[in-house]
Image (tube, rainbow, N blue to C red):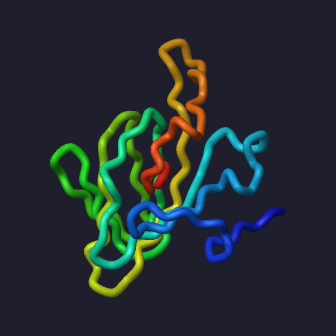
Amino acid sequence: MRTFDLITGESLFVKDLRVVRWEQYGLERDMPFQAMWYSVPPGSESPVDQHPELELSIVVAGTAHVLVGGAVHEVTTGNAFLLGSTEAHVVQNRSADELLTVFSAYWMPLDAEGSEPAPVEEADRPVEATAATQ
C-alpha cells in the first residue's frame, strides 16, 4: 500500500489556487488516469478551464459551485461531479471562511472504436487547477 499526503505534496499555484498533481508520485505505469488535488481559497475561483480529458472530481472539503454552460451546480463535501471532454468550467468557493479542496482524476475519453486516443503531453495540458482539477 502507498499513501499520498495532500499537505506535504509538491505544490504549484494557479492564481491563488494550490494544485498538487499526482505525476510527482511516479504512477504513470500503474494507473489508467492522472490525478490531482486543488484547493480554492474562500471567496475565490479557478480560472476558466477546458481540456480534452474527462474529469471526475470529488469535493473533499467545503462546497464547490461549478459553473458549466451558463448553469451553476452546488456540490457539497463527499459528493462528485463529472465534466465532459472539452466542457468549459469554473469552480468557485463562495464560502467566506472555509477552504474548498477537490480531488480530480482525469483521462482521455475512448474514441468511436473504443480505443483511447494518443495522450496529451503534460506540457500541452493547461495549467488551470481543474484538470485537473482534474
Query: Which percent across, then down, holds residue 3?
Result: 76, 67
Tell me how many marks there are.
0
Residue 117 versus residue 71 in the image, above or below: above
Q: Which residue, as the protein is rendered here, is positioned at the far bottom?
A: 97
Q: Is residue 119 left or right of residue 5?
A: left
Residue 50 falls in image quadrant:
top left
Query: Which percent across, then down, holds residue 26?
Result: 77, 50
Residue 58 versus residue 42 in the image, above or below: above
Q: Which residue, as the protein is rendered here, is positioned at the far top?
A: 113
Residue at 48%, 60% (x, y): give it.
58
Can residue 31 be seen here? The reply is: yes
Q: Which quarter of the rendering shows the N terminus? A: bottom right
Q: Is residue 134 left or right of residue 2?
A: left
Q: Which residue, as the protein is rendered here, is positioned at the far right?
A: 1
Front position in the image: 75 or 3 = 3
Can residue 78 be seen here? The reply is: no
Q: Is residue 33 left or right of residue 108?
A: right
Residue at 44%, 56% (x, y): give it.
129
Query: Which percent across, then down, holds residue 27?
Result: 75, 48
Residue at 33%, 59% (x, y): give it.
91
Front position in the image: 46 or 94 = 46
Residue at 53%, 24% (x, y): give it.
110
Query: Which percent across, then down, holds residue 123?
Result: 57, 39
